[in-house]
Image: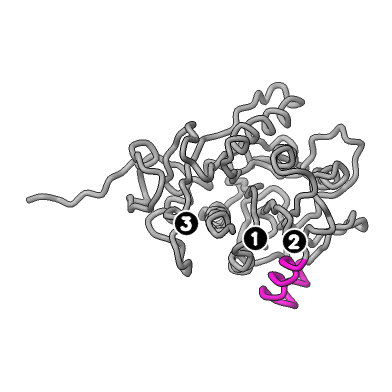
Amino acid sequence: MSVNRSPTDGAIVREELHGTRPEPTYGGALSFARRKYTKSLEGVDLAVLGIPFDTATTNRPGARLGPRAIRAASSILAWERPYGMRFDPFDELAVVDCGDCFFDFGVPGNVPGEIQEAASRIIDQDVALLALGGDHFLSYPLLKAHAQKHGDGIALVHFDAHSDTWKDDGQRIDHGTMFYHAAKDGLVDPAHSVQIGIRTTNPDTHGFNILDAPWVHDNGIDAVVASVRDRLGDRPVYVTFDIDCLDPSFAPGTGTPVCGGLSTHQAMAILRGLSGIPIIGADVVEVAPAYDVGEITALAAAHLAMEMVCLFASRP
């Protein structure tokens, strides 16, 4: 009697870059959403890059293991198109997982430059980049790489419990100061940028438009989407999602959890409502699996990353 066997280990053996095919979710070689694991970017539209860096944290470490956890959780999303989408983003885009950014942890001062260089190698080949962190500092060298490619004044859509705009002298590698420097350097334009879900006190907004968590809860998803779209204009957009934007009940596995945050549904719905924005890059950061419960944080991050893939697929 013949047995119908589905292929497995698609991350290694698949040759095609488009399309979705089923594979057992409980086994097989892992990549993000079972995409081909390759360093070659020929014919690629979007590359997923892990950045296992977490030495810029101010509280609990462990986000260096985030990329691995997100990849594992994403296997449950890889067998069909995302629910509610009118199209499969993997039919529209050739997406690969190009592994992890290499850096020498023993020479921490060199790490920002190594992250920037790894990102530039991808985006300079006209391939869009979705990064999996890692702590949130990595957004700063990623923004530097994108500004070199697309020009300064990028519009930033920033989901977080924290503003990450605290001032410092410019010498620190710190996951709480990088958007202060990104604005000061001109990499991002605060007037065309929005911070969503903030719920920690920082009296200086530095010109960023803030839709804090209470505002989101009081006004709802549609109002958030309308406000963000109004601010962005036609600027190139970078989307960054710190998983602690979610309430700890939805994402306990992170280094600096803050109560009162967004639900996974709210965050996914806001991202989906931004379909068609001119996104040029994105990241999902601060997943620290050592503090997770039942992998719900990693699963939330995988779903959010998939929503970002859909944003790339919906670009004009």
> Residue 97: where, in percent of width, then height?
49, 40
1 or 2: tag closer to the N-terminus: 2
Tell me if label 1 and label 2 are in contact, CB under 8 Å: yes
Q: In the orientation shown, which residue stands out farthest toward the left? A: 1
2 or 3: tag closer to the N-terminus: 3
Q: CA distance from mark 2 to mark 3?
A: 23 Å
3 or 1: tag closer to the N-terminus: 3
- The number of discs equals 3
* Quadrant of the image containing the C terminus: bottom right
Residue under circle 3?
A: 89
User: Dot 1 lies on which element?
Assistant: loop
Tell me the amino acid under the disc marked 2: Leu
Residue under circle 1?
A: 277
Question: Which secondary structure dominates the residues rendered in magenta?
Answer: helix
The residue lying at 69 percent from left, 39 percent from top is: 149
Q: Is residue 102 above or below residue 83?
A: above
> Residue 73: where, in percent of width, then height?
48, 51
Residue under circle 2?
A: 232
- The span shown in magenta is 212-230
